Image (cartoon, helix red, strand yellow):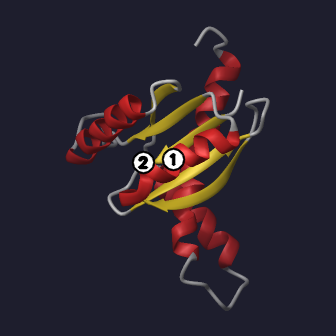
Amino acid sequence: MKVLALDLGDKHTGVAISDALGITSQPLTTLATALLNTELGLLLEKEGIESVVVGYPKTLRGTISKQTETATKQFEELKKQFPKYSWHLWDERLTSKSANSIMRTNKKNKKNKKPKDKLKVHAVAAALILQSYLEYLKYHKDA
C-alpha cells in the first residue's frame, strides 16, 4: 500500500511517499503549486499510489482559518480530478515548524546553504504528515 502525502501551500507543495508496505515515509519532492495537477498525475501513476493524504491546516486551537478553507477547496478539486485514488485530509498542525527545525539541525555543521534547500522544507513537512497518518493506520486497522 503506497501512500503519497501533500503539504499544500500557496506557492509550493511538498510531496512525500511511503514505502510499499506503508510503514515509513520519506520526502520526495517539492512542486510548484501552480503545476500540481499536471505533476501529480504523473507521480500517482509512476509510483503506483493507492491513496493520498493531504495536510489539513487547522489553527492551534483546532479551528478553521482562511488557509484551511483554501486547502479544503484544493483537496476537493484534486479528489475530482483523480477519482480512482483514496483521498484523506490529515491534521498538519506544527509540521512546518517541525520541518524547519529538522532542516536547521541538519544544516548546522554545513557552511554552504543552497537556495533550493528552503524548498526541501515542504517535502519534509509532507513526510511528517504522512508518518503521522501511517502511525495512525498501524494502530487503527479498520481506518
* Residue 45 picture location, percent across and down: 62, 39
- Does 55 appear above or below 139? below
Q: Amino acid at mark 2?
A: Asn
Numbered tag placed on residue 40 in the rendering: 1
Q: Which residue is mark 2?
A: 37
Q: Are marks 2 and 1 in contact (CB under 8 Å)?
A: yes
Residue positioned 60% across, 59% down in the render: 29
Q: Amino acid type of disc 1?
A: Leu
Identity of the residue drawn at 70% across and 21% down? 138
Q: Residue at x 32, y 58 (%)?
A: 10
In percent of width and height, residue 3 lies at: 64, 34
Does 131 sit above or below residue 138? below
Q: Residues within 10 Å of mark 1 (few under 14, many from 20)?
A: some
Furthest-left residue in this view = 66
Residue in front for this viewpoint, 114 or 47: 47
Instruction: Choose top left, top right, bottom left or bottom right for residue 5.
Output: top right
Q: Relative to 70, is 62 above or below?
A: above
What residue lies at 72% left-to-right and 26% top-to-bottom?
Answer: 1
Q: Nearer the viewer, residue 129 or 98?
A: 129
As drawn, which residue projects farthest toward the top? 142
Q: Secondary structure at mark 1?
A: helix
Helix, strand or loop at label 2? It is: helix
The residues bearing labels 2 and 1 have C-alpha atoms spaced at a distance of: 5 Å
- Quarter of the image for residue 61 reads top left
Q: Position of residue 42 (x, y in %)?
A: 57, 47
- Quarter of the figure that contains the C terminus: top right
Asked whether, in this view, residue 73 is left or right of residue 18, the answer is: left
